[in-house]
Image (cartoon, helix red, strand yellow):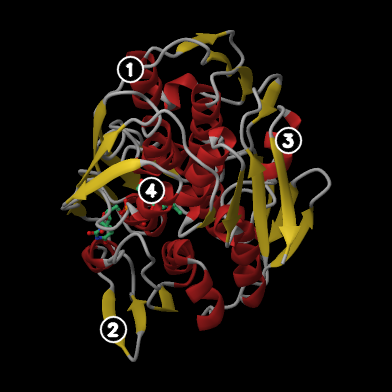
């Protein structure tokens, strides 16, 4: 177990390199077993969730070689077996549920234990199962398992009640093996959906419309061996951009794709942050001016991303004035608020909204990371709090941020990881 100790007050400077996106890499690793051959993924971040996803594939018979020196992941699924992933591993990683779409595409069958919810919400899978059933599968739930079987997957026209990222990914993967055409309506439009579609097409599938609300998949099994580099992590980039804003610093962020950050950059510019793009996915962020409060409402892409809500709550807690933050995607994603209040923030939760009154300073405290983005938000708060902030349970943070304290130290933060 580790904790991270931050001493506030340092100005940041220099440049930070963003890694590949956890939420693109995880579904792409799952989809890598669909060609029954070899896939080489490049620039793969050393994240806890990546290691767990690799462990799950190995338990299914895939051969994994992860060269962590260069972030190159080789996946050989020629000997993948039609067996069920272990409950223990599946419970450790909710995102592993996207394995179902890949296994269904490969074997016309998949069985997995119900993925745990997590602290930020109940995380239902009804839309995933609705999609599988629409593809002429039989979906059975028993003893905490979900089993999906099909004689032959058949294309279908599927409407998603809400634009679920995971359900869109699962259905997209399964539909590559369905006879005929599948249309997913009200599909999720996140950049990670587009990246998965590009990956599947590179392996020889036929997916069109990814990034829009209507995705069409023609039944064409992915069969080619390929090399692929996933997209940069827009949420990690957003997190470091907010770090410049909260510490009133000027830094360079490499691997920040403007196209993927439109809502986040729009809100930060509305607050008065200076952001210049110098091409090649590089942004110069200058937080040394005065910032004004804004209201935030999280929405499915291209709306403001829920995964940036906690970081903005930390930032707005020290911007003079009143901000209202409304979380519409998950039902319990304000757990960072009570920890920020321990540091002197003035935030009141009212249903799905948090009313933030900016304060002049925060003071360092002993706080707990309750989930991935909440943990990142507490580090951001620690960067400007008076004295020392100790963030406990940083394993949550390590799930989605590669060497976060090393990246912050490199741009001037007084931060260290302690083994407890
Ligand atoms: C993905 O989760 C991301 N995780 C999340 O990132 C992200 O917050 C989320 O998308 C929304 O952008 C990965 O990609 C691994 P959803 P996912 O299915 O796929 C409801 C992070 O911090 N819903 O779009 O689970 C559900 O209740 C993590 O990196 C149904 O009702 O998100 C939720 O409120 C956190 N039925 C909403 O949709 C379903 O069958 C969004 O869920 C599925 C979802």
Residue sitting nearer the eye, 367 or 33: 367
Closer to the observer: label 4 or label 3?
Answer: 4
Q: In this view, does 356 lie above or below 278?
A: below
Q: Distance of mark 4 from mark 3, alpha carbons?
A: 25 Å
Q: Where is mark 4, residue-wise? A: 341
- Circle on res. 330: none
Whether residue 331 is visible: yes
Marks 4/2: CA–CA distance:
42 Å
Residues at marks 2 and 3, CA–CA distance in whole angstroms: 48 Å
Question: Mark 4 and 2 residues: CB-CB less than 8 Å, in contact?
Answer: no
Q: Is mark 4 on a helix, strand or loop?
A: helix
Is residue 200 shown to the viewer in this render?
no
Between marks 1 and 4, how big is the CA–CA gap?
20 Å
SS state under label 2:
strand
* Relative horizontal placement of residue 61, taking residue 357 as reference (left or right): right
Q: Which of marks 1 and 4 is nearer the N terminus?
A: 1
Residue that mark 3 sits on:
409
Q: Give the mark nearest the N terminus, 2 or 1.
A: 2
Mark toward the start of the polypeptide (2 vs 3)? 2
235 shown above or below 179? above
Disc 4: CA contacts within 10 A as few (<14), some (14-19) or many (>=20): some
Q: Where is residue 139 in the image (x, y as percent from the top left)?
A: 27, 77
x then y, percent, for residue 419: 75, 63
Q: Residue 141 carries which label?
A: 2
């Amino acid at each position: 177990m580790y904790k991270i100790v931050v001493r506030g007050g340092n100005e940041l400077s220099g440049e930070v390199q963003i890694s590949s996106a956890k939420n693109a890499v995880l579904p792409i690793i799952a989809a890598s077993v669909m060609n029954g051959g070899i896939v080489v993924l490049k620039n793969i971040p050393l994240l806890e969730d990546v290691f767990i996803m690799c462990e799950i594939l190995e338990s299914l018979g895939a051969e994994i070689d992860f060269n962590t020196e260069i972030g190159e992941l080789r996946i050989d699924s020629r000997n993948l077996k039609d067996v069920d992933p272990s409950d223990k591993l599946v419970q450790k990683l909710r995102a592993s549920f996207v394995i179902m779409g890949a296994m269904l595409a490969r074997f016309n069958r998949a069985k997995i234990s119900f993925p745990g919810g997590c602290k930020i919400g109940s995380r239902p899978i009804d839309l995933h199962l609705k999609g599988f059933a629409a593809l002429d599968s039989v979906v059975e739930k028993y003893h905490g398992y979900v089993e999906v079987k099909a004689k032959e997957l058949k294309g279908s026209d599927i409407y998603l009640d809400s634009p679920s990222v995971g359900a869109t990914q699962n259905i997209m993967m399964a539909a590559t093996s369905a006879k005929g055409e599948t249309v997913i309506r009200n599909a999720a439009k996140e950049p990670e959906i587009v990246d998965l579609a590009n990956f599947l097409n590179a392996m020889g599938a036929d997916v069109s419309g990814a990034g829009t609300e209507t995705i069409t998949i023609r039944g064409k099994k992915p069969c080619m061996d390929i090399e692929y580099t996933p997209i940069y992590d827009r949420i990690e980039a957003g997190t470091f951009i907010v770090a410049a804003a909260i510490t009133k610093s000027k830094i360079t962020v490499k691997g920040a794709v403007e196209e993927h950050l439109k809502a986040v950059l729009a809100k930060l510019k509305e607050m008065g942050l200076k952001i210049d793009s110098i091409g090649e996915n590089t942004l110069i962020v200058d937080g040394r001016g005065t910032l004004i409060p804004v209201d935030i409402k999280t929405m499915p892409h291209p709306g403001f991303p829920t995964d940036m809500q906690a970081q903005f709550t930390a930032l707005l807690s020290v911007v003079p004035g009143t901000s209202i933050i409304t979380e519409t995607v998950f039902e319990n994603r304000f757990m960072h608020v009570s920890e920020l209040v321990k540091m002197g923030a003035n935030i009141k939760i009212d249903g799905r909204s948090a009313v933030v009154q900016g304060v002049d300073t925060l003071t360092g405290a002993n706080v707990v990371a309750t989930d991935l983005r909440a943990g990142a938000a507490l580090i951001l708060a620690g960067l400007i709090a008076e004295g020392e902030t100790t963030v406990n349970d940083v394993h949550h943070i390590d799930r989605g941020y590669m060497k976060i304290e090393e990246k912050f130290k490199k741009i001037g933060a007084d931060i260290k990881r302690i083994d407890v």
